[in-house]
Amino acid sequence: MNSAPAKIVIKSPREVELLRAAGRVVRQVLSELGALIRPGVSTAELDARAEELIRRAGGTPLFKGVRHPQARMPFPASICASVNEQVVHGIPNERPLAEGDIVSVDCGVRLKGYCGDAAETFALGRPVPRVERLLAVTREALEIAIREIGPGQRWSRVAKQMQKFVEDNGFSVVREFVGHGIGQEMHEEPKVPNYYDRSQRQVDFELRPGMTLAIEPMVTAGRPEVKLADASGWAVVTRDGSWAAHYEHTVAVTSEGADVLTNGR
């Protein structure tokens, strides 16, 4: 069938613009935090500044207070700040960042009832060549997805290209965490994986204008397997201790391709 699955909410042009407005706040936060990140600054300081910016813009932090069945507490911060071997959901803390670290900042905003979600990995100083390459490859995997999106396209075809590019460059795609639909809720259907295998045949979907997706490749320098870092149930780390990068944009599918809603325009 050519119709979208019933659970996928197709957005009107007005709703896409509301998502874009939330995305502008997300981009403002990521841009300002990127300018603040340097050795000696803690991720707790970044989080405090992010919340200040979000609330000043009239929004609310999308992640703060979110509950998860495996977590002992609601998420306590406005951003996820995942350092080095942390892949995602890192809780900001008072430990100063150091020269050579990388930190993936994931920011979500609710504004006027609609959500924006994006992530970027920042390097402190000049990373070693393999880590520098890790960031470049992860960023390009996201760009591949944005370029390849088009109406009538199956998501699996896009995901295969992302995965091939990452693995051809000697890195691994995380399987346990994937992108998602987004709208009035942070997580909507469909699930948006960054890889493809036969188990996903039943959940593959056709891209249609009005779909809004948060696409977020998470890539490791070593093996793809991950685990929880501690008993909090939030921070996820690579099982082999290799470092990881994470980039994300919220995009709308249009009749011509992809419209990025979190690039600040």
Image: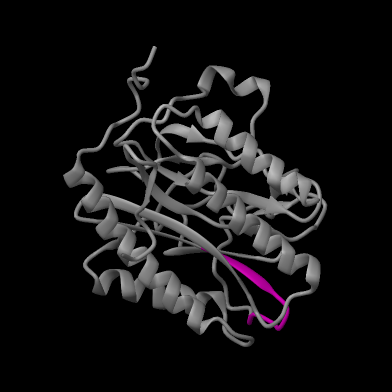
User: Considering only vertical position in the picture, is 16 above or below 191?
Assistant: below
* Residue drawn at (67%, 26%) of the image: 197
Relative side of 241 to 116, left or right = right
The N terminus is located in which quarter? top left
Q: Position of residue 242 (x, y in %)?
A: 79, 58
Q: How far across and down, in percent of the image, does residue 85 sit?
A: 72, 61
- Which of 162 and 114 lies nearest the eye of the viewer? 162
Please report the residue visible at 57 percent of the width from the left and 72 percent of the height from the top: 93
**Residue most toward the bottom?**
40
In magenta stretch: residue 100: yes
Q: Which residues are magenta?
A: 96-105
Q: Kindly give the residue lying farthest to the top in the view shown.
A: 1
Residue 57: x %, y % from top left: 24, 70
Magenta segment, prevailing SS (helix, strand or loop): loop
Height in image: 68 above or below 87?
A: above
Left or right: residue 70 compared with residue 4: right
Q: Which quarter of the figure has residue 160?
A: top right
Q: Nearer the viewer, residue 98 or 143?
A: 143
Coloured how?
A: one colour
Residue 176 visible? The answer is no
